[in-house]
Amino acid sequence: MNMIQPHSIDPEEDDDMDIRSVSHGLYIGGTWRPSRSGRRIEVVDPSSEAVISAVPDATIADALDAVEAAAAAAESWRSTPPRKRSDILRRCFELMVARAETLAALISLENGKALRDARGEVAYAAEFFRWNAEEAVRITGEFGVAPSGTNRIVVDYQPIGIAVLITPWNFPAAMATRKIAPALAAGCTVILKPASETPLTAYALAALYEEAGVPPGVVNVITTTDPGGVTAAMLADRRVRKLSFTGSTGVGRMLLAEAARHVISCSMELGGNAPFIVFDDADLEAALDGAMVAKMRNAGEACTAANRIFVQSGIHDAFAEGLARRMAALRVGAGIAGDTECGPMITRKAVAKIDGLVKDAVARGADIRCGGAPLDGRGFFYPPTVLTGVSPQSAMSVEEIFGPVAPIYRFETEDEVVARANDTEYGLAAYLFTRDMGRGMRVAARLESGMIGLNRGLVSDPAAPFGGVKQSGLGREGGQHHGIAEFMEAKYIATSF
Ligand code: NAP
């Protein structure tokens, strides 16, 4: 492992990223304002632990103002011609692409991820606007004859109403645009509550939407240290008809219960525990390439991250050696440093959690092949780590690691690995590598997972439905009609003529 010296970013000296240009206000009804309490939330650079900015800490009254603003803009936005909405979304895409370097630097600064990952995120996040600009003009209804022949059945798709969107810190841009773009394409107005650790990207994007022509009140952004209270108050407002959440399964469960009180439609993108399966007949180098992407994109802080790596006996030792060599060679450092390959974790607490999981696995007999302990010094760094001989009883085999730790489990047969891969409450992503496409498709069909990477370590694509089964969530984002459908409701009209 190569350690690049972590350093803090001085915004005064950085030409690419001037964080003073990010508006530091709640964005409500097209205006920037402080919170009613005057309190603020500090934003920390996880590479240096320096406070780099502060954003308003919204109260419940602020949140209700945001609902008011979304309600005031709702009628006009839903009756805006689809072509016009499409043009505005397209402009959002173009502006994001034009500002890609600045946005990537901002993401890297507040989240810590390597600049190369941040650039990838901006490209992915922008694509949701391009894709939904294209979809916005293709929302159609249905028309048919009732089986009795007595009447016609007309089905019209209408915007569901005001949507509350809640996003996590691990993809500060993409998790937001994956919701905002389809909601706007469908004709909904929204209130976004981004994660407290990474609010700057959400506010920077809000300014960009305004520049692209998104009218005041159509997108509102608030940050708060009281997410539970603020969300409950917004959901209790009868005009709010949708909750779209991305985050942990635990918080998702609580929000489903809260939404149930008001019978609000929910989309849930929750946690994962992805199996990554390598059969004996796999192309070893391709499987290693795939594992590096599936494990190390975002330094392992991804819901789709390979969490349990199952390797068949015949290829196990060569794979473990190859993975340890590649992981140990990664350059660790501040995300914003150009040559970093693995940035810091989001918080000190996250490092402590990963450390606890590794210690537990080692206590249960695992061998450390590289890494294995937090790095000293400033910043929340944990090194790329490979473990072999990991016991299925280890906590990391049931919990999301959410860090750069790759536990390898040996297996013998196809039936065995399918059973072990499915032995989890989660079902978001799964990966498998084999040269036998018959087996690949057969195993893909048997895995209880919303998304499968077959000889690929990356599945995310705005044009494909993203989402999980079991406790990994409800609903889909992206895809030809799936993402927009989450923000629409079918209205059936019976008529005779
Ligand atoms: P988290 O703790 O669940 O937080 C996610 C968001 O929910 C944040 O904005 C957070 O606000 C907010 N929140 C927390 N408590 C809340 C409450 N009681 N009511 C309303 N909102 C509340 O998750 P995280 O640690 O940020 O993100 C990591 C998790 O997200 C992992 O489990 C990961 O797998 C999952 N994830 C899933 C997907 C997917 O597409 N399936 C994608 C990315 C991440 P604060 O920041 O203010 O606490």
Image: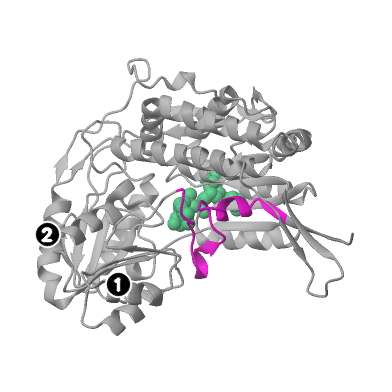
Q: Residues within 10 Å of mark 2 (few under 14, many from 20)?
A: some
Q: Quadrant of residue 71?
A: top right
Q: Is 341 left or right of 119, judged from the image as shown?
A: left
Q: Nearer the viewer, residue 388 or 317?
A: 317
Q: Which residue is mark 2?
A: 322
Q: Nearer the viewer, residue 335 or 276?
A: 276
Q: Is mark 2 within 8 Å of ligand 1?
A: no
Decide whether the magenta segment is chiefly helix, strand or loop: loop
What range is drawn magenta here?
462-489
Task: Choose the circle earlier in sequence order: 1 or 2.
Answer: 2
Q: Is 371 left or right of 117, judged from the image as shown?
A: left
| Residue at image location 20% in from the left, 34% down from the top | 339
In the image, is residue 146 part of the stretch drawn in magenta?
no
Tell me the quarter of the image containing the C terminus.
bottom right
Q: Nearer the viewer, residue 33 or 152?
A: 152
Name the residue type under label 2. Answer: Gly
The Cα–Cα distance between marks 1 and 2, rounded to whole angstroms, is 23 Å
- The answer to whether residue 196 is seen in the rendering is no
In the image, is residue 464 part of the stretch drawn in magenta?
yes
Q: Name the secondary structure under disc 2.
A: helix
x%, y% of residue 425? Answer: 46, 72
Q: Quadrant of residue 446?
A: bottom left
